[in-house]
Image (cartoon, grey):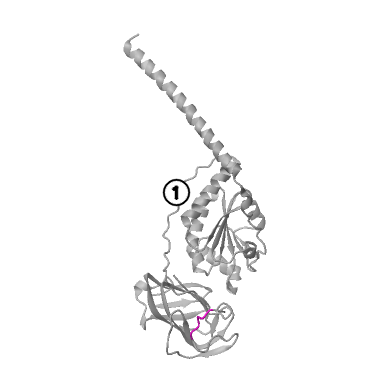
Amino acid sequence: MKTEVKSALILGTIIVVGVGILSIVFSTLDETTTEKINSDISELDKSKFKKAPKLVGIEHYLNTTPEKLNLEMEDKVVLYDIWTYSCVNCIRTLPYITTWNEKYEDQGLVVIGIHSPEFEFEKDSKNVEMAMEKHEIKYPVVLDNNMETWKAFENRYWPRKYIADHEGYIRYDHIGEGGYKETEKIIQQLLDERSTALGIQLKSSKHLVELEEFEHTMFRTPELYFGYKFAENRNQLGSKEGFQPEKIVNYSENENTDLHKFYLTGDWKNHKDSMELISDTGTIKLLYNAKEVNIVSDNKAHLKIFLDEKLVSEKMHGSSMNLESSVNTSKPDLYNIISDEESSSHLMELKIKGKGFHIFTFTFG
């Protein structure tokens, strides 16, 4: 046999043996890793975690039925999102939640929107359905109109996210906006735990969702409430006539305007959650500091908006404002009036034409 042939045979034998040894080594490593993961999960003491409460007092089930939802939740990782559709902080979280639903639904994640309303109009299922269509929400949403599930979770905030593992233990709790990367990593971790515990093979990506996150102004005007019940213990109405529950009040012009307070002119009826314009026209003035201004309102009206006694410049137009620096309201919803790149202070005036116009809040970003 030629020397070259002998060398080739010897080299080939070495390669085959080497590949075999490596296969055994990697196989052993895989088994060890799997055993370690299973061991870590089995050793996890869940006595310190609470079980997610049952959904109670639900008036409507949207995108699902009670029976279907119960089946979908079995052995699944569940993200509970407590929200309400006119809350701007809730709205800012929705692009992340809808994207997570689409990304992880087939891997064992169930997203449930728990719609716990702040205002009476948010209890109307048709209004919620319109909001779901607007924000492309395809996951189940339950209407917690009497706040019974809210209370079962011992919650006090909008928005709030709880994530329960496949055994129903709450493993994560986040209040408000932000923390999106942290939240998604928890989702991935709990899905991995589930697949290991149930012996399911999943091809999962560890890449995180990248969306433009809203950056809040550190010093900004707080939310301003127009309902006397919501404004209780808050010094937010600057008009000297003050709040007068369930009365129609003629508000007159004020000489001075203080920061973080609103001032009215015209005839307004004081409701517990809003103010209603009784005269044909009226105005609202406020001195605020923020880069974004929104209102929550209801009924048809035409609002002409001025900043520092001038029409709003186009670069500061909110998404609800037209080119004439006006906002036309109709249905109960949140309307974005001002959207600027940087925070600044301005004297804003809303000149309102539309008897029956309701305003609930100003919110700022």
Q: Is 365 located above or below residue 178 in the figure? A: below
Residue 200 seen in the figure:
no
Residue at 51 percent across and 57 percent down: it is 98
Task: Depth check: give the residue in front, 45 or 161.
Answer: 45
Amino acid carrying mark 1 in the image: His
Instruction: Count every numbered label the image shows and give the total.
Output: 1
Q: Is 172 located above or below residue 256 in the figure? A: above
Image spot of residue 251 (x, y percent) = 50, 89
Residue 288 seen in the figure:
yes
Image spot of residue 345 (x, y percent) = 38, 77
Residue at 44 percent across and 21 percent down: it is 17
Image spot of residue 340 (x, y percent) = 37, 71
Q: Which residues are magenta?
A: 234-238
Task: Depth check: give the residue in front, 233 or 265.
Answer: 233
Image spot of residue 207 (x, y percent) = 44, 48
Q: Residue furthest top?
A: 1
Rendered image quadrant of residue 309 = bottom left
Q: Is 356 located above or below residue 92 in the figure? A: below
- Label 1: which secondary element: loop
Q: Is residue 63 magenta?
A: no
Quadrant placement of the C terminus: bottom left
Q: Is 11 located above or below residue 300 in the figure? A: above
Quadrant placement of the N terminus: top left
Report which residue position mark 1 lands on. 207
